[in-house]
Every structure is written in structure tokens, then in C-alpha cells.
Amino acid sequence: MIGLVLQDLPAAGGRGRDLVHLSDEALLSLVASSDDDALAELYDRFGGVAYGLALRILHDEALAQDAVQEAFLSVWRTADRFLAERARASTWILTLVHRRAVDLVRREDRRRGEPLEAAPEPEARETVEEEATLGFQRRVVQEALRRLPPDQREAIELGYYGGLTQSQLAERLGQPLGTVKSRTFTGLARLRELLAQAGLEESFSN
Amino acid sequence: MANDVHALVGPYALDTLDRAEEQSFEEHLALCERCREELASLREAAASLAYGAPQAVPPPDLKVRILTQARAERPNVVPLRRRRSWTAPLAAAAAVAAVAAVVLGIWAASLQNSQDPFETVLSKPGSRLVSMGAAGGVAVAPDGTAVLAVAVPPAPADKTYEAWVIEAGKAKPAGLFSGRAGTSIVEIPRRVPSGSVVAVTLERKGGVRQPTSKPLAQSEKVTT
């Protein structure tokens, strides 16, 4: 339940409160009332995947840290607006992270005068523990991507992980803009189905 | 398809429009319920892609930097603390105006559980307690800051209470809450201007953009 009923909440301010059992949405409600323990807990849950994403997009550790920091500060400043978003808290947070990273990569691209060559994906370095949790989610996403038609997969990957705009994609792929837009749409819609089939949404909602 | 503005919901969900295109699509989005529905589920799919990136471990000081910065700019929100005394705000409230006894009754009962936000608004000079009839009331400060005190039972599992600020016939969403035995205290996240009305409806879980049912409680017109 997203609702913020203040008197239902435990007294805030104490260190080391046990927030682990709260849902992501409940934590966001607490963040909206300036509870920094709740922000810390959200960071513990999503900081790793956020940093992995930012690093994938930016290929630069300092820039990736900037992106994650700005995104979590956006969460802090605007958590009260989340109620209107009709989304999962995780979706909202990761959308903010992606947005910050993409803003930074586009700024870098402009500075260099051309888009970064979309680098090949680095080798995964996963510990045993990550293998068990994030590793599983990663494999499901990778498998869903693999099952997309290649032209759709290319548009999705270059767009999402490469930070390319639709016009840049059209140029890169040598395709009309309309074709690229429609590949992006059908690819993402197909990905949605594949992820739903894999039951991934369930495993992400925990 | 290529020229269909609706199809832009895909590129938008994937965050691959440039910021100018994005803005013009958002104007469309504001008017198109179909696209908003589509966007919600496409965004979930797009955000899942984050998990497809290689796992990386952020440096430990990143968390510290984020929390330090967050604390430094902590917004001016009332912290939730044990109240010191519940008699002073009662007196302050009594001085506010002629207040419906039922409102005070509900409020006083709720004080035992500590209600700083409500108290804080009421204690601002020039603030008003606007009656919502038997259901409760709204404390409104002259700057439009408002806190709702309303007695509604816990909402069914698939429902939520939604607060609204209604101005010139237009209802704007003003927060979700779950209800409880006793009085729920809800900070209104938007300004409540003079001439507006605050209302509460029961809606489907997750909330809605416009009320779909008659208000369970509705305030008198706010005058500040």
C-alpha cells in the first residue's frame, strides 16, 4: 500500500531501524517524508543494479557514480510525486537512473562531437552470491533479449544501453526514422511479453 | 505506424527520444489515456533491462555521499516525533475559530497517538480548521499547506482512499491512504488554495487520476 498514513508508521529518527521487511513502495512513502534511513534501504536494494546500468551506459566509473548519485537525490527530492506515477517503485527508480545516465552520455557525446561507439558488453564478473540473485535476473533478461528478432534487439540494446536517440539509431542502422521507431515499439512490446512469460516480473517484485 | 503518434510510446518508454521530442510526446500523453496505460507496462519492461547489464559493485563511499547530500538538503517536512504535550495544540486549535465539536473530538482522540503535522499546520498564524462534517476536517495554513484528519475505516485490500483538491470544478489527486480504526492523518502534497474543497473517495488500489465515485467526505469551501 502506497498510502502515507503517518500514525501507522513507527516513530522515525531512530538509527538502525529494521526496514528490511517493508515494500519498496512503503519505503518511498517514508522517503517522501524525508526519512533518510528509508533512502539508505532503497539504495541497498537498487544501488548495485543502478550502478551496473550506469556503468554499462557510460563506460566510466566516475560518470556512472555521478549518474547514480543524481538519480538517488532525485528520488529523495521527488518521492512525493511517485504516487501519481502508477508504477512500481523499482521501475520508477531505475527509470530515473537510466535517464540520468543517458543525459550524461549524450552530453559526453556532444562534447566529443559523435556518439560513443557502442562498446561490446564487458564480461560479467559475478560473485557466487550475485550469481544466485541478480545473476538469475540477468540471465532471464539476456534470454528474453536473445529471443527478439535481431533488428528489434539491436534497436532496443543500442537505444537503452547505448543511450542513442531515435534519430541517432536511424543513422547508425541506416534505416528510415519511422522504421526505427516502429522496431523500438514492437521490440519493447515483445520484450514485455517474453519477460511476463518468464515470470520475471514476479521475481523482481520481491 | 511510422507516423502514428501513439507508436512513440515505445521510444518514449525506452528513453530514446531527444528531450524536445519527449516534451511534445508528453503533451500527447496528457490527453491520451490509451498511451498512459501502454506506457505503464512498457516502462516496467524497459526498467527490467537494467538487470540485463553486467553486475557491478559501486564503491562504498557512493552511499555515504548520497546520504550526506540528501541530509544536507532535507526538505522542510515535519519530522515524525513523539509529541511533547497534547494540550498546547488543543488550545491553539480552539483559538483558531469556531470549530465543529466533532472535528475536535476526532482530533483530540487522535492526539494520543501523536499527530505533529496536523498540529503544526494548525499552530501557524492564520490557519483554519475546515469541517468535513462528521468525517473530520482539514487544517489549512494561509500558504495553502494542508493536513487532513479523517475518520474512515481500513480500506478493503483492493481499494485505497484517495484525497482530492477540487478547484473550479476540477479535481486534482492529493494522495492515497489506507484508512484505519480511528483517525487517519494525511499530509496533502499539493497546495489547498482559498475557494477550493478537499474531498475523499474510495478508489481501486493504486489510485486513479480522476474520482470515480461520490466523495465519502467533503470539506466546506476553504477560506484563507
Image (tube, coloured by chain):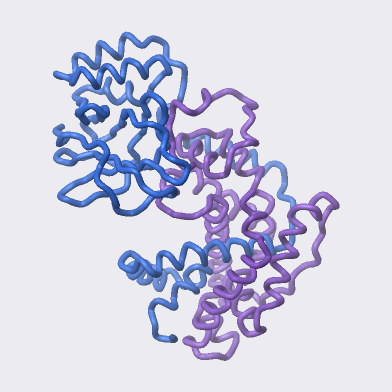
Chain colours: A purple, B blue
- Residue for point 40% across, 43% down: B160
Quadrant of the rendered image containing residue A200: bottom right
- Residue B209 vs residue A19: left or right? left
> In the rendered view, does B6 fall on the left or right side of A137?
left
Q: Quadrant of residue A183?
A: bottom right
Relative horizontal placement of residue B24, taking residue B47 as reference (left or right): left
Residue at the front extreme of this rendering? B156
Q: At x 44% / y 36%, what residue is drawn?
A: A4
Q: Is residue B217 or residue A128 the one in the foreground? A: B217
Outermost residue toward the right in this view: A128
Residue A151 visible, this angle: yes
The image position of residue B83, as x and y in percent, is: 42, 15
Tell me residue B107's x, y (percent): 31, 20
Q: From this view, report whether residue A149 is shown above or below residue B174.
A: below
Q: Position of residue B38 (x, y in %)?
A: 45, 68
Residue A70 in sight here: no
Q: Nearer the viewer, residue A6 or A156?
A: A6
Quadrant where the C terminus of chain B sits is top left
Q: Give the number of callouts.
A: 0
Q: In the displayed structure, would residue A121 be above or below residue A134?
A: below
Q: Residue A24 placed where, x, y %?
A: 57, 44
Q: Residue at x 55, y 90 (%)?
A: A175
Residue at 69%, 41% (x, y): give it: B61
> What quarter of the picture does the N terminus of chain B occupy?
bottom left
